[in-house]
Amino acid sequence: MSLVPRSRFFDMDRFFDDFWAANGNEADAPESFFSPRVDIVDRDDHYEITAEMPGVKKEDISITLENGVLRLEAETTQEKKEERKGKVIRQERRFGKYVRSFNLGGDVHEEDIKASFDDGVLKLSAPKKAKAAPTQKRIDIN
């Protein structure tokens, strides 16, 4: 059986990804930006954030929290075209910079955010600040 290149125009698997891409040909632009797939769960006392980052090394990930905005960044690089042998029939792997931001608001403990990275999956646990109980103050009448 021989592999036959398939035109990207008729590639419905990637139609929507390519449609919204900044430039129509991500494979030729390793510096292009794209967002990792993310799941966010709001638990009673914390947020759970899980992001897929295939092909990314732990040391290439940057996580910051500034003014309640959590920012995930990572970068992957592609082997140089000169180092590749043979004709590329199909290229679907993405290379470039991952960027994703979330507004968690002011109810997150910045110091207590925990992160783990295993098999290309980044998991974050962001504890919420305890809500202050409403206080009631009696006002004396003079």
Image (spheres, grey):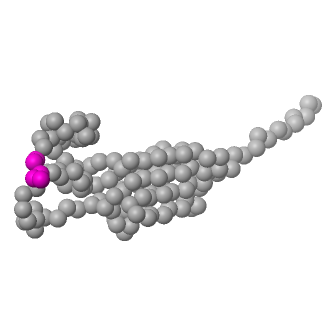
Of 66 and 7, the residue lying toward us: 7
The image position of residue 19, as x and y in percent, is 23, 35
Residue 128 falls left or right of residue 12: right
The residue lying at 18 percent from left, 42 percent from top is 23
**Residue 78 figure quarter:** bottom left
**Residue 75 figure quarter:** bottom left
The image position of residue 66, as x and y in percent, is 47, 53
Q: Which quadrant of the figure contains the C terminus? A: top right
The residue lying at 15 percent from left, 51 percent from top is 90
- Residue furthest top as drawn: 141
Secondary structure mostly taken by the magenta-highlighted segment of the chain:
loop
Of 71 and 87, the residue lying toward us: 87
Residue 3 highlighted magenta (yes or no): yes
Residue 109 falls left or right of residue 103: right
**Is 134 situated above or below 30?**
above
Residue 49 falls left or right of residue 135: left
**Highlighted range, magenta:** 1-5
